[in-house]
Image (cartoon, rainbow, N blue to C red):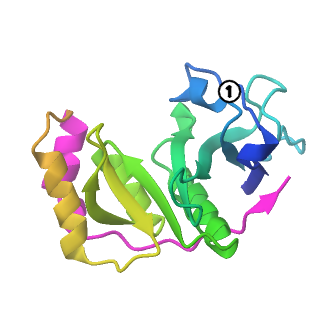
């Protein structure tokens, strides 16, 4: 697996993702966000630009940009993992790598807003923590760097408990995974294409 930053918002990178295989596919066509991807090299050929044979070896993508009011902060806007690869931790690895990459480039804070407990848990693995804030869209705001505690993790999970949930989300929240913050994963090295 390779983790690549395709470009910054000013570079205008775009990705054409299959909307049947990737959530938020239309958001990646927009050129006003940077793009980072996870690529799996199955055939020895990489499809870094995402426009070869449909989606090629691209298995996950993140769109990101600077905060409009704070130039020292950066937001991860959309995270998507190909539907046949969800649940493998690829999105968390890509987010962890991009978090480290952005912090290494003098951003003081990296933020993301999540709308479901699975994304919340994955982003905790990637080194983000709940801030106690939500967006107007009822998304929970997480950021890094942060001080991870089981208490702040549970606080965010409790916000989800008050919502209409799928059966899978109910199972996540009722199990121990909803009560104890997951271990932080080591971020992979990111590099620019």
In this orientation, does residue 42 appear?
no
For label 1, the residue is: 29
Q: Nearer the viewer, residue 66 or 190?
A: 66
Q: What residue is shown at x 63% (from left), y 43% (from top)? A: 61
67 relative to 28, above or below = below
Q: Looking at the image, how many numbered discs can be counted on the residues? A: 1
Location of residue 84 in the rendering, given as x and y in whole percent from the top left corner: 54, 34
Q: What residue is shown at x 75% (from left), y 53% (from top)? A: 5
Extreme-front residue of the structure:
69
Is 144 situated left or right of 191 in this image?
A: left
92 relative to 108, above or below = above
Extreme-left residue of the structure:
162
Q: Which quadrant holds the N terminus?
A: bottom right
In this orientation, does residue 187 appear?
yes
Quarter-wise, where is residue 181 in the image? Answer: bottom left
Location of residue 148 in the rendering, given as x and y in whole percent from the top left corner: 33, 77
Location of residue 33 in the rendering, given as x and y in whole percent from the top left corner: 65, 41
Q: Is residue 189 magenta?
A: yes
| Magenta extent | 167-193
Q: What residue is shown at x 54% (from left), y 39% (from top)? A: 80
Q: What residue is shown at x 20% (from left), y 56% (from top)? A: 157
24 relative to 104, above or below = above
Location of residue 108 in the rendering, given as x and y in whole percent from the top left corner: 55, 73
Neighbourhood count class around disc 1 (C-alpha, 10 Å): few under 14, some 14–19, many 20 upward: some
Q: Nearer the viewer, residue 8 or 82?
A: 8
Q: Nearer the viewer, residue 153 or 21?
A: 153
């Amino acid at each position: 697996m390779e983790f690549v930053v395709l470009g910054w918002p000013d570079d205008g990178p775009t990705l054409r993702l299959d909307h049947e295989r990737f959530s938020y596919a239309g958001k990646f066509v927009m050129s006003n966000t940077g793009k980072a991807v996870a690529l799996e090299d199955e055939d020895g050929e990489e499809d870094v630009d995402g426009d070869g044979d449909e989606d090629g070896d691209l298995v996950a993508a993140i769109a990101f940009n600077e905060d409009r009011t704070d130039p020292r902060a950066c937001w991860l806007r959309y995270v998507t993992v190909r539907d046949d690869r969800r649940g493998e931790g690829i999105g968390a690895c890509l987010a962890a790598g991009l978090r480290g990459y952005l912090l290494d480039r003098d951003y003081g804070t990296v933020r993301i807003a999540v709308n479901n407990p699975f994304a919340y848990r994955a982003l905790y693995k990637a080194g983000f923590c709940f801030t106690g804030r939500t967006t107007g869209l009822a998304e929970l705001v997480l950021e890094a760097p942060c001080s991870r505690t089981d208490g702040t993790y549970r606080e965010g999970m409790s916000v989800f408990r008050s919502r209409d949930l799928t059966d899978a989300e109910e199972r996540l929240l009722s199990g121990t995974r909803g009560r104890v913050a997951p271990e932080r994963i080591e971020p992979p090295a990111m590099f620019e294409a």
